[in-house]
Image (tube, rainbow, N blue to C red):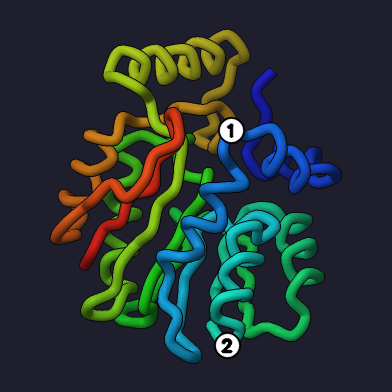
Amino acid sequence: MLEKMSEFFEQRLDGYDAHMLNDIESAREFYPYTASLLPTFPECRVLDLGCGTGLELEFYFACNPTAHVTGIDLSEGMLAALRAKFPDKAVELVAASYFDLPLGENLYDAAVSVESLHHFTKEQKIPLYAKLHKALKDGGYFVLTDYFAPDEQAEREHRQTLLTLMAEQGIADGAFYHYDTPLTVGHETEALLSAGFSTVEVMNKWGNTCTVVAKK
């Protein structure tokens, strides 16, 4: 049975960090690698979309302890766990959907998202990325590490399976339900460029997980 996104993660809070680090292929490589791409100058401002329990932030604050991080996540439980990890850091946490929340303009030196955005379509992402583009300062950039479909056929199959499950379960409320529907790297790149980013570069790859950097 499909579960609403926020409820899915609330139910799996216990053991979440261990699962992500130990059961997701190459996670112990891509979390620190992602953190290494974020700005290191003092008191920079970083936006984290779908921050969860802050796994990437553990590595980031080790590199830049004075960074100011705004984290957005649907799960109150995940945010509480993140807050407990970093009681002495400049962290602002918001329990909301990053699709619905205003992000402001020219506020952040960089943005980051790890293993969060592979649940949404290209059409859903373009307005989110346009909003994110406006929220970044001139010269800002977005570091995205996520699970991607290996080809367009796999992308279509993931999406069709979700739609079939929703129809079978009578789901028509417009809410987000947890099911992986990753885009190809090519379609993700198209979404970012359509939203106004000037360049998108694949920085590293671990199986079907990639890190891309989109520059404003």
Other-residue count near label 1 (Cα within 10 Å), few / some / many at <14 / 14–19 / ≥20: some
Q: Taking 80 as reference, is 92 above or below it?
A: below
The answer to which quarter of the image holds residue 208 is top left
Instruction: Looking at this view, name the residue that lies furthest to the bottom.
Output: 42
Q: Which residue is mark 1?
A: 25
Sequence-earlier tag: 1 or 2 = 1
Locate residue 79: give its quadrant: bottom right
Q: Secondary structure at mark 1?
A: loop
Q: Are marks 1 and 2 in contact (CB under 8 Å)?
A: no
> x, y percentage for residue 56?
59, 59
| Screen quadrant of the C terminus | bottom left
In this picture, residue 200 sits left or right of residue 47 = left
Kind of element beneath mark 2: loop
Residue type at tag 2: Thr
Alpha carbon distance from label 1 to label 2: 30 Å
Residue 52 in sight in this render: yes
Lateral position of residue 196 relative to residue 202, left or right: left
Residue lying at 62% horizontally and 34% vertically, measured from the top left: 24
Question: In front: 49, or 203?
Answer: 203
For the point 46% across and 74% down, which residue is it?
A: 46
The residue at 33%/73% (across/down) is 135
Q: Nearer the viewer, residue 90 or 34?
A: 34
Question: Is 199 situated above or below 164?
Answer: below
Task: Identify residue for label 2.
Answer: 66
Residue 143 versus residue 150 in the image, above or below:
below
Residue furthest toward the right?
A: 14
On the rendered image, what quadrant is the N terminus found in? top right
> Along the line of sight, which residue is nearer the eye, 61 or 88?
61
Residue 213 drawn at (x, y percent): 30, 56
Percent of width and height locating residue 51: 59, 58
Residue at figure coordinates x 65%, y 57% from the top left: 55
| Residue density around tag 2, few if under 14, some if 14–19, many if 20 or more, within 10 Å | some
